[in-house]
Image: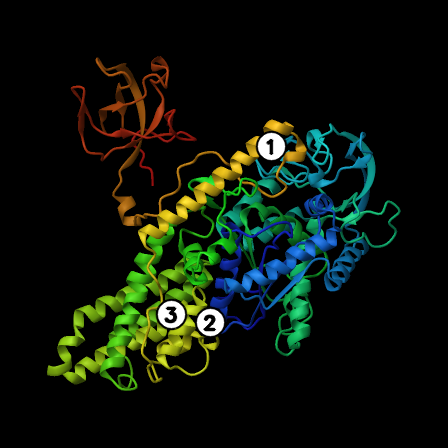
Amino acid sequence: MSHDDFPTDRPAVVTCGLPYANGDLHIGHLRTYVGGDVYSRALDRLGQETAFVSGSDMHGTPVAVNAEQEGVSPEEFALDWHERYAETFPKFNVDFDNYGHTHDETNTEITQQLVRDLDEGGHLYEKEIMVAYDPVDDQYLPDRYVEGTCPYCGAHARGDECDEGCQRHLEPGEVEDPESTISGNPAEYRERTHQFFAVSEFADYLSKFLDRLEGTSNARNQPREWIEQGLQDWCITRDMDWGIDLPGENPQDLVLYVWVDAPIEYISSTKQYSERVGADEFDWEAAWKEGASDEHPEGGEIVHVIGRDIIQHHTIFWPAMLEATDHAEPRAVMASGFVTLGGKGFSTSRDRAVWADEYLDEGFHPDPLRYYLATNGGFQQDVDFSWEKFAERVNTELVGTVGNFLYRSLLFAHRNYEGGPDADAPSDDVAARIDEAVEEFAAAVDDYSVRALGDAVTDLARYGNEYIQRNEPWKLVDEEPAEAERVIYDCVAIAKAIAVLFEPLAPEKSERLWDQLGEPGSVHDATVDAAGEGPAGDLSEPTELFEQVEDERVEDLNEKLEARVAESEADETDDDDEEGSSANDADTTDDTDMTDIEPLSDDRISFDDFQELDIRVGRIEDAVGIDGADDLLKLTVDLGAETRTIVAGLKGLHDVDDLPDTKVIVLANMEKAELFGVESNGMVLAAGEDADLLTTYEDAAPGTKVK
């Protein structure tokens, strides 16, 4: 691993968190896989040697439970979903170099060998622990066979993770008030012998590793809290039949915990890719094993693209395993936010989701969804999906900006210049702007920002629209034909650069654009060097790349979605009325929080706009009611440089007598307003319907600026 700007001379591996072979894919899942594919393709464009790999996560209790409910073996159940995933990803132009699964021979062999290496290195030990047990059904309950209360935050939790609360990984025996998810019976804890990995020994290493780690800030910062709290050793075995057997003596027939073999699939899938294309094409050992390459003994550039709910596994457990077994550590972890629907989390049990197949069945092309998922907010931020927002982004940016520039430029060129306009090279200003776009593209790769990759393209297309409009070649054709041809040549040069730089986000549409430009070969093989070379092909008559999404279509899509969700929720209510609520009725897939939260705005302000907000720390000196106003108080607020009167809707939500001496945050340059005869000179900031007052953590003095 290096920390040099990309491209480097080391082999890179980009991985995506393994989809759990347990149910249909929705667009929330696709955000991670599209993000990984975009990033991998962007590395390719820079000339970085890259393998993009993943696979299906076949093991674990949800697979075993659902297989039993369907009356099939866990292997048959998981393989069926694996095959569906392998068919679905290419439909969205997610192009893995290798897509394997955790139950195949390669992963089984590598997993068991790595566990032997941990044991031989003195990093494993046996320990008697308390394991949940169902005395009625006479069976042990590993992981998600049990649920109860998180001992750390008190939220409802699964057996291995506080999924509804603090997101902390939970060891066997930690969940309080355990119940069986199979029968609903209360469980008890019984003593069993299990294998532990001494993760705590790697606390110093992991702290320094996080200092080196690149990627999104949530992946770098969130794990520090767990290290500071003190790392607990990790139970790596489970009492169940489905999984990879613990190697060596195994009298209790334990299998390895799913989170042992799941990340090892990254190595296994890379090995399978190397075996298929040859080590000369890509050497998996040079990428993953320390000391395998004399030139780069510390290994290659490993980039993990995951959902934020599995940060701990990829920044604590996995790098500790790699360090203990002389494997290369990850260079970066990119952790995506969730996709919500109308401010609520996707719910597979309530059919509250936009499914991957549903999107395609509606006749939409995959590339607009790729663009939407990749560029709608920062990668680590939650994204609220709605058909209205999707249509707006498609119509405004893909159709109105990128598509409009490409079609008008290429159509004018095709109609006026047989074979295309001729010039030696793009004009200096245009060449400089294309170079700037390439630099923005490269910077986005080094910043791990898939959104900025898209911005580099749309900004270049926006420049192209301004350029053609400013020069008006249609007016120059008759009076200054040479100048008109130069302008259109510049526009075609910009179009070629867009084809190259847009390939990671819209690979199929970019290939179609490449063909319209008459460029040789495939855009998928072009590097950023081609973006600045200027057009050389014979133009064909262009067609518009992107289609408008009409308002009537959005209304129809919303009606279908609302009807489906309502029907599913009604069915679920009927089931509850008939059968009562029990653990058997629980959804075995991951539902996110269904609390009503207003979706984040897609409208952004610049840093300069933010700087214009004068936000200050204030201290309330006095608070009195206002005659005739049911909910308003007149506050006297010390802002350091002066004392102001501010009217705030706090009556009934706060005890008026408790407000004096309270620190608050004030928007000081808010326009003055008169309310019930009182002039208000500022705004006190508060959160939510209950007006939770924003304040300071420490002792910032009145007048201190918030920035």
Residue 215 visible in the displayed image: no
- Looking at the rendering, in which quadrant would you find the N terminus? bottom right
Tag 2: amino acid: Leu
Q: Name the residue under label 1.
A: 575
Residue located 32% across and 47% down the image: 603
Earlier in the chain: of badge 1 and badge 2, it is 2
Quadrant location, the C terminus: top left
Above or below residue 592? Residue 655 is above
Is disc 1 surrounded by few (<14), some (14 to 19) or many (20+) residues within 10 Å? few
Does 338 appear above or below 420? Answer: above
Residue 678, x across and y down, in percent: 18, 20
Secondary structure, mark 1, is helix
- Nearest to the eye among marks 1 and 2: give it: 1
| Element assignment for label 2 | helix
Instruction: Give the amino acid type for the residue marked by disc 3 in the picture.
Output: Val
Residue linked to disc 3: 438
- 385 or 428, which lies in front? 385
Give percent across and percent down for residue 77: 70, 52
- Marks 2 and 3, how far apart at CA: 9 Å
The answer to whether 310 appears left or right of 608 in the picture is: right
Which callout, 3 or 1, points at the residue further toward the start of the chain? 3
Nearer-the-camera pick, 252 or 662: 252
Q: On the picture, is 208 further left or further right than 435?
A: right
Eyeballing the image, is 243 above or below 507? above
Which residue does the numbered mark 2 point to in the structure image? Answer: 46
Q: Could you tell me residue 403's position as x and y percent?
A: 31, 66
Badge 2: residue crowd in 10 Å (few <14, some 14–19, many ≥20): many
Residue 182 is left or right of residue 664, and the answer is right
Q: Which residue is drawn at 70% across and 46% down?
A: 70
The residues tagged by marks 3 and 1 sit, at their Cα atoms, a distance apart of 56 Å
Labels 2 and 3: the sequence-earlier one: 2
Q: What residue type is labelled 1?
A: Asp
